[in-house]
Amino acid sequence: MDQIFSPAVLVILNWFVTIFFLIIGLFILGLIVVYILDVSQKKNAVLHNYPVVGHFRGIFSTLGEFFRQYFFAMDREEMPFNRAERNWVAHASKKEDVTVAFGSTRSLTPVGTSIFVNCPFPTLESDAAETQPVIIGPYVKNPFTAKSFFNISGMSFGAISKPAVLALSNGARMAGLWMNTGEGGLSPYHLEGGADIVFQIGTAKYGVRNSDGSLNEDKLRDIANHETVRMFEIKFSQGAKPGKGGILPGIKVTSEISKIRGIPQGEDSISPNRHPEVDCVPDILDFIAKIRNVVEKPVGFKCVVGAYGWLEKLCQEIHRRGIESAPDFMTIDSGDGGTGAAPLALMDNVGLPIRESLPMVVDILLKYNLKDRIKIVSSGKLITPAEVAWALCTGADFITSARGFMFSLGCIQAMKCNKNTCPTGITTHNPHLQKGLVPTVKAIRVKNYAEAMIHEVEVIAHSCGVHEPRCLKRFHMRIVQNNGRSLPLNELYPEPDVISEYVS
């Protein structure tokens, strides 16, 4: 051996052998320690009965959600968004080919499946019309002329990161969209992008609150003085947790977020489950009037619909006070969850899904002749052209999406939004994890996604024989029933006649 290897090489080999056996020894010692700890503990029966190997159950359970996404789930199986939906957004945001080959992988037979009714004489490109802007808030001093029917839904700075806000605000400006701040207040990064901003007032009144949580009108007025802040949205409830306020874990409450929101740093921030100022239907209009008098811009509200009798009372109260008293818009959210942290009991079980609530709200406004006065914004898992077109057919004036735009930023549905460990940098304030999210790059993808969405919805509209998407009506869509046949949406949800006393 001495003749084959030099003394220096022998020293190195001996060192490696020593290290190798040391590692093996430490590994075995570790297994012995884990074994002793497992058999001596009394909290976990699996670990007690199967020491050491019982830990693999937890490891495999954790890894299972990732492996299912990539290897086992079919393209249309996953929840909350399947691979086909995510891939469409990803390709659209990168300006890649969004066509498919060899037939649809979507089954057209399940109950509730929506099918658009193509026209024998589709709209020619030469006859197509641009979607016209819509004026929101005709009775306020500073109405808002909204250019796009597809916009960015509320995602708070705090729930999402600085680079995510910068990418969304810059992308929104480039695409001509509005961007909702979410309830977390107005950050410099919302303003830096130059997009049209909808400022959301949550139940904690972040950014416009006094120390006791009440509304500070001076702060509200300062927000309204920003030219790009176009509208104000009072959040009564949201899809992830109707009946419960927002939840921001303390690990996400940095010094900057603390200052913007007006809350203690490092502490969990849980909003009240409703606005203390709003105890009944008349209070809704009083609160809207109070805010509108301060900001002199359009004011509306966001809610998840469960009980709905209050909506009829609201319409009656509007007519009693006068048409000017109406909210300028209503955002209807779906009861099946959103981007933020929420109790499973609420996310899974409380609030009507948008497929039921949207036509209900539209019909109530039609019945009371308020549909033209109050613009309807539809939110909740509408991330593909067919879903957006469905909302337009049903009667929505605008559609907003949060998770669709998160996918355009690179979200991989890791389901870690309520942690500070988002691997794509979107919902984390960990500087290391944020480095991969470059705002200038992702802003282009936000713009591409929005433009692809608008174009594809126009394709559906033209196939149905109308000149632009807002001309889509309920008779342009059919819904599959239990017997396997489809019925027109206008037969399932016939538009009501206006109550005679409210006819203009």
Image (tube, helix red, strand yellow):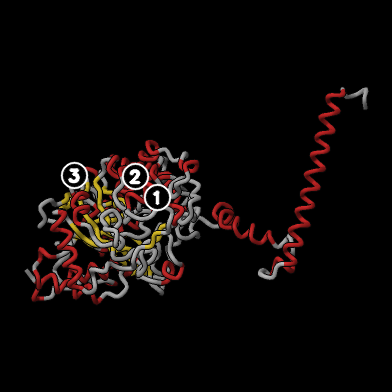
Identify the element where label 3 is drawn. loop
Identify the residue at image location x=20%, y=47%.
Answer: 129
Residue type at mark 3: give it: Glu
Residue 475 position in % (x across, y down) = 25, 64
- Classify mark 2: residues with Cα within 10 Å, few (<14), some (14-19) or many (20+): many
Q: Nearer the N terminus, badge 1 or badge 2?
A: 1
Residue 496 position in % (x across, y down) = 19, 73
Residue type at mark 1: give it: Ile
Residue 114: which quarter of the image? bottom left
Left or right: residue 341 versus residue 461 is: right
Residue type at mark 2: give it: Leu
Residue labelled with disc 3: 227
Mark 1 or 2: in front is: 1
- Measured in 3D between alpha carbons, the distance from the residue under mark 1 to the one under mark 2, in whole angstroms, is 11 Å
Identify the residue at image location x=53%, y=57%.
Answer: 74
Residue labelled with disc 2: 168
Q: Residue 79 got which mark?
A: none
- Classify mark 3: residues with Cα within 10 Å, few (<14), some (14-19) or many (20+): few
Identify the element where label 1 is drawn. loop
Label 1 with label 2: CB-CB less than 8 Å = yes
- Classify mark 1: residues with Cα within 10 Å, few (<14), some (14-19) or many (20+): many
Residue 248 position in % (x across, y down) = 41, 57
- Measured in 3D between alpha carbons, the distance from the residue under mark 2 to the one under mark 3, in whole angstroms, is 18 Å
Identify the residue at image location x=40%, y=52%.
Answer: 265
- Measured in 3D between alpha carbons, the distance from the residue under mark 1 to the one under mark 3, in whole angstroms, is 24 Å
Nearer to the camera, 183 or 92: 183
Residue labelled with disc 1: 160
Residue 57: which quarter of the image? bottom right
The quarter of the rendered structure image containing the C terminus is bottom left
